Amino acid sequence: MKRPTHASLTAALVLSGLTALLFVVSLGFGPVRLSPITVVQALFGGGSEEQRIIVQEIRLPRALLGLAIGAILGLSGAALQGLLRNPLAAPSLFGAPQAAAFGAAATIALGLADVRSFALPVAAIAAAFVSVFLLLAVAGRNANMLLLILTGLAISSLAGAATALTMNLAPNPFAALEIAFWLLGSLEDRSFRHVLLALPFIIAGAALLVMRRDAFRALSLGEEVAQSLGVNVAELRLLVIAGVALGVGASVAVAGTIGFIGLVAPHLVRPVVGYDPARLLLPSALAGAALLLAADIAVRIIPSTSDIKVGVLTAIIGVPFFLYLIVRERRSLGGGIG
């Protein structure tokens, strides 16, 4: 048991350093390029007034959201994979972000709240909660991979159709256009108001997901074994549902739909950390934060006539990775690819 523990600690330290580096680099990229030294000076009150405004007021909220949203997506993916005992489980595959987007879009389109209201993350969280609950209720406790994917596809399609209908029925066409761009997923032009809207819910969701992390280890042996070891599986399921709904709902409410971080992050760290789902949670959160920060830096570097949305980039990277995982899973089950 010592080797996996040492590997998990080493991975966490390396990922922490990488995430911190990407955080500083993120603060330096933009129309005005700043060196890492200048960024650190401006972050702590040094440098010129212009540099402090750029770093502290313009770029810092964006970087903080990238850090927090990436972390909760990675953590949610690892928790769902541990709960469902399925390596393909992720919030983006089972309708939680799409449902959260519908809740937020409906709130905006109906004029119930604007993008700076706390009603927006509440609506997104409620919709995400319903989607994850439906997944577990419809697919069942011991659903196989195919059943989970089909159920998630149905929920995602329903939420996407509902969002499209909401946009079509929106009384203000400009609101519909704004929702369409927002759904692509972006951290651009975010302020500390957005950070304050999302961060409390993200922290609460993360706390729920790690609260019973040791139970995931017992659950990996099967529900009956876990119950014999004193794990309340029904309570654990509700905690994960609530944690994913809080974190993903709040993330979508302020940044739109950013997919596949929750799927990719656990798989990147699992070969190093091992297959213990309890030890996978923290490294997955750090990997998710690093991935989203790196993707947000990339969209500012890639030459384009218009701003590339970070949600588009994560999807372009995530879809081939997902297909690779499906092929690998098929081979492990004895099936060919021909």
Image: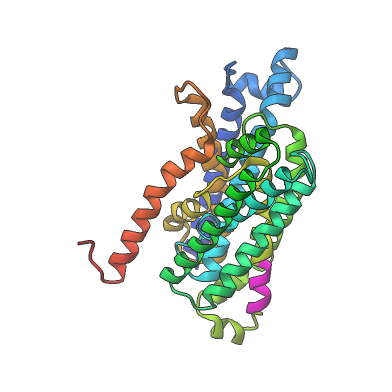
Residue at image point 63% right, 72% down: 237
**Percent from the top left, x then y, of residue 17?**
56, 40
**Looking at the image, can residue 234 be seen?**
yes
**Percent from the top left, x then y, of residue 207?**
71, 59
Residue at image point 72% right, 43% down: 108
**Percent from the top left, x then y, of residue 5?**
53, 61
Residue at image point 65% right, 47% down: 251
Segment colored magenta: 233-239
Along the viewing direction, whichever of 108 and 129 lies nearer the viewer: 108
Q: Measured along the vertical axis of the image, is residue 122 above or below residue 289?
A: below
Decide if residue 30 is on the left or right side of residue 319. Answer: right
Q: Measured along the vertical axis of the image, is residue 46 above or below residue 2?
A: above
Decide if residue 318 is on the left or right side of residue 241. Answer: left
**Magenta span dominant secondary structure:** helix
Along the viewing direction, whichever of 95 and 294 lies nearer the viewer: 95
**Percent from the top left, x then y, of residue 231?**
64, 80
Q: In the rendered view of the protein, which quadrant contains the C terminus?
A: bottom left
Residue at image point 45% right, 26% down: 302
The image's colour scheme reads rainbow
